Image (cartoon, rainbow, N blue to C red):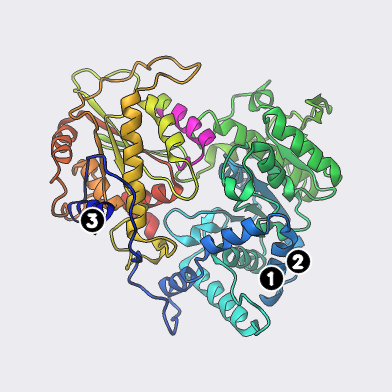
Amino acid sequence: MSQARRHLRPALFLAAVSARVPTTGVAARRGLSAWPAPQEPGMEYQDAVRTLNTLQTNAGYLEQVKRQRGDPQTQLEAMKLFLARSGLQVEDLDQLNIIHVTGTKGKGSTCAFTERILRSYGLKTGFFSSPHLVQVRERIRINGQPISPELFTKHFWHLYHRLEETKDGSSCVSMPAYFRFLTLMAFHVFLQEKVDLAVVEVGIGGAYDCTNIIRKPTVCGISSLGIDHTSILGETVEEIAWQKGGIFKRGVPAFTVLQPDGPLAVLRDRAQQISCPLYLCPPLEALEEGGPPLTLGLEGEHQRSNAALALQLARCWLQQKDHRGLGELKASRPSLLRQMPLAPVFQPTTHMRHGLRDTEWLGRTQVLRRGPVTWYLDGAHTASSMQACVRWFRQALPRRPRPGRGPEVHVLLFNSTGDRDPVTLLKLLQPCQFDYAVFCPNLTEVSTAGNADQQNFMVTLDQVLLRCLAHQEHWSGLEEERPGPEPGEPASLPLAPHAPKTHSASSLVFSCISHALQWISQGRDPVFQPPGPPPGLLAHPVASSGASVLREAAAIHVLVTGSLHLVGGVLKLLEPALSQ
């Protein structure tokens, strides 16, 4: 047995380890789930999701994307073929009046703001996004709500059987991969439900994304750009900007937020090449002049950029498709900034204000206050989004201790996946001065057999645990370095006093999210009350001593970040209603 495998046993059976360990070795080929795809699928929701999970070939699909970077047309033609086999043509999608949005940071929040603004006008909206947090049906929404299990099941089997019936021997791939299938399904649902518009979030990139078969969107948007998915999109932010600009269409207005000069120039050139009118969004402050400040339903200063983009997308859509309520809008004359035309400055309508205020987008700068335990949830997974997450978290923490209260404990719950650089993300989290850092895979339980929505066939349990052990090792190394504050930030914020650290490397690895939450909350979260701790939860000295600190703390502040899938698993346990 390899040394790495030996260290997996404490993570699996004792649930917590603390020593720094080597992270090399051969992972076993053991899957995460004991549930195979049903041989004769039924018509229940869980049967549909389990069958959908058999299409989880994202790893192979991404490898194919890398090989075909120079020929995106091949991928788009394949998607068009799947669309035709499903019974639709590209022209049919024109009926959906689509708002197409991409970006590195904030594209999901921008979509959520945009959808809620337009819904406040009484329009029937469709919304396609990824990934899901708790249930896969969250990816396809009608009027802001995930489609029902019944509607998901109905459309899934209709599409699945249609694709089965139309496959032939000449096709090397009879079924689309997971994300492609859901994209096709979303188009069918939106057309069947006769939505007034559909907000569509790009999956990865833009030029190569399967949503880019949309040929005539009403308007396009690009949120903040940064480094992500480098193996697919390119090593530099300029290369990534070129990919994101792939959603531009001739004559279709597009908007973006203020970007660094390099990527902004790439977007400008990309738009000019195909005669796409591209506008730069003025800051939200410009739209607040002369009126009351705007209230956003999503916390964090970085959400103001997303809200500014959403307002422009909604206004542009209304101008072209539905003029209701726009008579009161008084826009400024066009002007230039960085050789790009500025989008109009206007005072948001009452509907727009209500839409921004009422926007909900779970897992993004979300706070759950549960007695002495406060959970801060943000799915940041890139360097720029993690910087924004850290700013938000430090500002959201209590600034002063309450009279008569004891020390407060700050806990980090972290995981990262894919080709993200965990060292960069963890280094950005250092200024938060956590008392404990906890690492676990994106698994709600050690076995996901009873929960098809959380299944992932692309990795093994050993693989994800080895990655968590590597995260712990990186964190321990960073703790020894003790970096100073970020440039431009104060050395420390006047926060409530921390509990004294009980160990030089106060970090733990758990085998699943449930075990991690049980240790962190120590039964003090009034909603999260599992039957009992697993055997060996406190076997390690750090787990045992830390449990005492957590039980006696006046307050526990927990930041959950690094992966939207991790945040989704936490929400599934902390908010049981989301699974119903």
Q: Which residues are magenta?
A: 379-393
- Would residue 77 be seen by someone viewing this image from the given angle? yes
Whether residue 547 is in magenta: the answer is no
Amino acid bearing label 3: Leu
Earlier in the chain: of badge 3 and badge 2, it is 3
Label 1: which secondary element: helix
The residue at the point 71 percent across, 63 percent down is 76
Q: Quadrant of the C terminus?
A: bottom left
Q: Quadrant of the N terminus?
A: bottom left
Amino acid bearing label 2: Val
Q: Quadrant of residue 485?
A: top left
Query: Label 3 vs label 1: CA separation?
Result: 43 Å
Instruction: Name the front one of labels 3 and 2.
Output: 3
Whether residue 383 is in magenta: the answer is yes
Mark on residue 90? 2
Mark on residue 83? 1
The secondary structure that dominates the magenta segment is helix
Judge the density around disc 1: few (<14), some (14-19), many (≥20) Cα neighbours within 10 Å.
many
Earlier in the chain: of badge 3 and badge 1, it is 3
Query: How many numbered tags mark residues here?
Result: 3
- Would residue 575 be seen by someone viewing this image from the given angle? no
**Residues at discs 1 and 2 in contact (Cβ within 8 Å):** yes
Give the x, y percent position of residue 132.
Answer: 48, 55
Query: Label 3 vs label 2: CA separation?
Result: 49 Å
The residue at the point 71 percent across, 72 percent down is 81
The residue at the point 62 percent across, 36 percent down is 224
Residue carrying label 3: 12
Earlier in the chain: of badge 1 and badge 2, it is 1
Amino acid bearing label 1: Leu
